[in-house]
Amino acid sequence: MPEGLLQSQAGFVHRLAGSMPVIQVENLHKTYDLGEVQVHALRGISLEVYPGEFVAIMGASGSGKSTFMNLIGCLDRPTRGRYLLDGQDVSEFSKIELAHIRNRKIGFVFQGFNLLSRTSALENVELPMIYSGISHQDRIERAREALRSVGLEGREEHHPSQLSGGQQQRVAIARALVNHPSLVVADEPTGNLDSRTSVEIMDIFQRLNAEQNITVLLVTHEPDIARYAKRIVLFRDGKIRRDSVVEDRLDASQTLLDLPAVEDDDEEA
C-alpha cells in the first residue's frame, strides 16, 4: 500500500475534524558525510501526526528511526525536506532557535532517565522552567502538580538514588510534561525497566494521552510495548515501510491486573 494512503488511514479522523498536525514532515532526507562515504539515513520521509495521537516508531538498528527522532526532537536538522512543528517550519532554524523550540514545545523521556543525581525530584522537574524564565513560586506549583500526575506525590524531596527505576522514569515524565509541550518524545522509555514496571510506565502514557490529549511519539524495539500505542510506524532502510492503526491495542491498566502482584513500587530503592 502506498505510503500516503497508509498515512491517510491513520490520520483520517483528525483531518475530518480539521485539526492541524503537530508533526508534518515532507520529503525529509538526512545524509551523513563520512569522508569518502555518504550514509543516507533518511530517504524522503513524509508523515503527519495529529493532536492526541499516540504513535510508536519501530525499526531495526540502522533503519533510520533514531535519526528521525533526532530531527523530530529538534536535536538535528535535515539535509533537505521540511519539518513543521505546530505549523512552524523548523527545518532551517539556528541552534539557538532549535533549543528554544525544544524547551517550549517538546518534552523528552529517555531510556537512561537523565536526572541530576544530587538534585531532588522536585528540582529535576523544575529544571526546564528555569530556562523558560518562570517565577520560582510558579515553578514549585507546576512541578508539584506534574509529580502528582505521575503518582509521585510525597516523593518531591527524594533524590534519584532514593527512588526505584520506575519512580525515576516517572520523574522524567513529569519533567517532560511541566512546560505543557505540544509533543512528548519517549526514546526507549522502558529499556532499563523490568516487565511490570514497563507496563506501569505505559499505563501513565496511556492515561496522559487519553485524559489530557497529550501527543506521544514513542521509540521502541519491543513489539509488545508498541501495542500500547494507537498507531505503529515501521522504518526500514531510511523509509517508512508500514504505517497502521493498532487493531489489537493493549490496555496497560488491564495488563497490570493480569500480572502477578509484586512488592510495592512506592518503596524506596
Image (cartoon, helix red, strand yellow):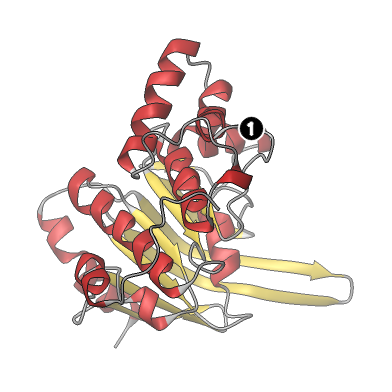
Q: Is residue 22 above or below residue 49?
A: above
| Disc 1: which residue | 119
Judge by depth and name the residue closer to the eye, 22 or 245.
245
Judge by depth and name the residue closer to the eye, 156 or 216.
156
For this view, does 238 lie left or right of residue 57? right
Judge by depth and name the residue closer to the eye, 54 or 124.
124
For this view, does 210 lie left or right of residue 119? left
Q: Position of residue 160 (x, y in %)?
A: 60, 44
Q: Residue at x 30, y 68 (%)?
A: 229
Q: Residue most toward the bottom?
A: 1
How many tags in the picture? 1
Judge by depth and name the residue closer to the eye, 60 or 224.
224
Q: Position of residue 13 (x, y in %)?
A: 13, 61
Q: Residue at x 38, y 55 (%)?
A: 24
Q: Residue most toward the right?
A: 35
Q: Residue at x 39, y 70 (%)?
A: 196
Q: Is residue 131 above or below residue 42?
A: above
Q: Position of residue 204 (x, y in %)?
A: 32, 54
Kindly state the secondary structure of the residue where label 1 is placed.
loop
State the quadrant of the N terminus: bottom left
Q: Position of residue 200 (x, y in %)?
A: 35, 62
Q: Residue at x 63, y 46 (%)?
A: 161
- Callout 1: few (<14), some (14-19), or many (20+) C-alpha neighbours within 10 Å? some
Q: Is residue 20 visible to the viewer in this orientation of the structure?
A: yes
For this view, does 10 lie left or right of residue 74? left
Hey, what amino acid is under mark 1? Thr
Quadrant of the image occupied by residue 218:
bottom left
